[in-house]
Image (spheres, rainbow, N blue to C red):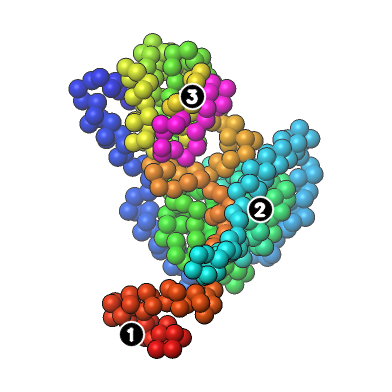
């Protein structure tokens, strides 16, 4: 675990290295993924079968090996323990309500020149969702991806999820039923993303691919952007906790470990103005790791990528947070509002001592699919808009064309495009 102090002479350089650290896929992953994508593009189902047998130990032979029927999803939902089923339903209800409010409005108006202008929002025809099934199998991720697509009005919703040795996660199937997923396929990895993008004999292509995955899945999405739309290229999870010494160090330790347990290359960072509190948090992390079932992963993440930054005053924190542009920023303060207003780059911000990031992963409502790797500088979390596109429309009448058409003719002639100019001019009687 790295310990930095903003008043130290070498802090600026150490912090610069921290900001520029890349914990994502390397050239070998990019090369391997390119080969997999090309294989699926050329050989379709045959390539999927070979790769699934190799990576997941699952044989794709008859229809039941390839696809999980809706009836199995319904049964998984009905067989859930009642308390867990109620929790899943609450999460779905809150996620749906939040995303309903994101639906954009169409525009249709006539401006001062008499030109009718507007825009029409429409959903994509089909969306594909990647849901992990190896190290992590998360029903919450299925809800977070599927519900915005359904709210957008997507007609065909396709889930791909690996089923190692043929075993499907019943919670994921239950979530698929609750979210009204249309198809669930037993494939994973870069090959599953390729199948969604290109289509195969069995699987029809989609228009947008979203959802979390490992480095190979993220790289596949990056390489296939343009063939399909994607939500984002997601890297390892990250959390930045900004906390004063009035916090319970155990609470802060668990917040840091909530992301560290995701992945050995996840990153947890604490910024505090209290050195003694920092010491207590570090000790609490160690104590938690002694009993945490996910300790092996969390410890590797904390030891190799964890950071504690001590500042003289928390007024320094927003500038550091904006440079880090973290996926999750937690402001564990009595009055987090001033800092929140000063933080311009973050995937999602969690305000106050009683708002742990983990609650946002499940039941708060906003989407937990968020930009990582400093991409919060220019991108946002998954939303209804990722499953929609906007088409503008324009309508002139004779008066409107006479009012502003000559300016278009002049610009077209200046650009050396006479056919452009003439298509307008002939309507003006020239």
Find disc 3 in the rendering and name its residue.
Answer: 336
Question: Which of the pair 76/424 is nearer the observer?
Answer: 424
Disc 3, SS: loop
Determine the CA span between mark 2 and mark 3: 32 Å
Instruction: Name the residue that disc number 2 marks.
Output: 151
Going from N to C along the chain, the mark reached first, 2 or 3, is 2
**Mark in the foreground, 1 or 2:** 1
Q: With 160 as the anchor, is 278 left or right in this view?
A: left
Percent position (x, y) of residue 80? 76, 39
Determine which residue is flagged by label 1: 418
Res. 124 visible in picture: no
Q: Nearer the viewer, mark 2 or mark 3?
A: 3
Say which residue appears at 50% left-offset and 61% top-offset: 229
* Magenta highlight on residue 347: yes
**3D distance between C-alphas at marks 3 and 1:** 59 Å
Q: Considering the numbered disc 1 on the image, is that residue within a helix, a strand or a loop?
A: helix
């Amino acid at each position: 675990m790295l310990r930095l102090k903003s008043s130290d002479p070498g802090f600026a350089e150490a912090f610069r290295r921290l900001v520029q650290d890349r914990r994502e896929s390397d050239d070998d992953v990019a090369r391997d993924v390119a080969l997999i994508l090309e294989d699926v593009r050329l050989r379709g189902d045959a390539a999927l079968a070979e790769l699934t047998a190799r990576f997941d130990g699952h044989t794709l032979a008859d229809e039941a090996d390839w696809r999980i029927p809706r009836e199995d999803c319904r049964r998984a939902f009905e067989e859930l323990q009642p308390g867990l089923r109620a929790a899943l339903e609450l999460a779905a209800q809150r996620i749906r309500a939040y995303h309903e409010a994101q639906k954009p409005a169409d525009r249709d108006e006539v401006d001062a020149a008499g030109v009718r202008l507007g825009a029409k929002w429409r959903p994509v025809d089909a969306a594909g969702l990647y849901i992990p099934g190896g190290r992590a199998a998360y029903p919450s991720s299925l809800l977070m991806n599927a519900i915005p697509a359904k709210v957008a009005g997507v007609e065909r919703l396709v889930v791909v999820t690996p089923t190692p040795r043929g075993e499907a996660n019943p919670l994921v199937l239950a979530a698929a039923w609750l979210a009204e997923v249309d198809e669930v396929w037993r494939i994973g990895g870069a090959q599953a993303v390729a199948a969604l993008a290109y289509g195969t004999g069995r699987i029809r292509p989609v228009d947008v691919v979203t959802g979390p995955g490992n480095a190979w899945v993220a790289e596949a999405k990056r390489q296939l952007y343009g063939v399909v739309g994607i939500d984002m290229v997601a890297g390892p999870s990250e959390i930045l906790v900004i906390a004063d010494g009035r916090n319970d160090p155990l609470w802060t330790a668990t917040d840091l470990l909530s992301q560290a347990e995701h992945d050995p290359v996840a990153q947890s960072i604490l910024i505090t103005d209290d050195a003694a509190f920092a010491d207590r948090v570090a000790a609490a992390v160690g104590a938690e790791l002694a009993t945490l079932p996910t300790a092996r992963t969390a410890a590797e993440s904390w030891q190799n990528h964890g950071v504690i930054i001590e500042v003289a005053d928390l007024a320094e924190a927003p500038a550091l947070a904006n440079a880090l542009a973290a996926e999750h920023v937690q402001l564990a303060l009595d009055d987090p509002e001033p800092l929140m207003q000063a933080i311009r780059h973050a995937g999602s911000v969690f305000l106050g001592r009683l708002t742990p990031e983990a609650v946002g992963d499940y039941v708060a409502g906003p989407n937990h699919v968020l930009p990582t790797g400093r991409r919060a500088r220019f991108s946002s979390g998954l939303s209804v808009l990722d499953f929609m596109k906007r088409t503008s429309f324009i309508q002139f009448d004779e008066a409107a064309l006479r009012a502003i058409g000559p300016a278009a003719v002049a610009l077209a002639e200046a650009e050396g495009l006479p056919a452009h100019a003439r298509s307008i001019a002939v309507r003006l009687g020239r």
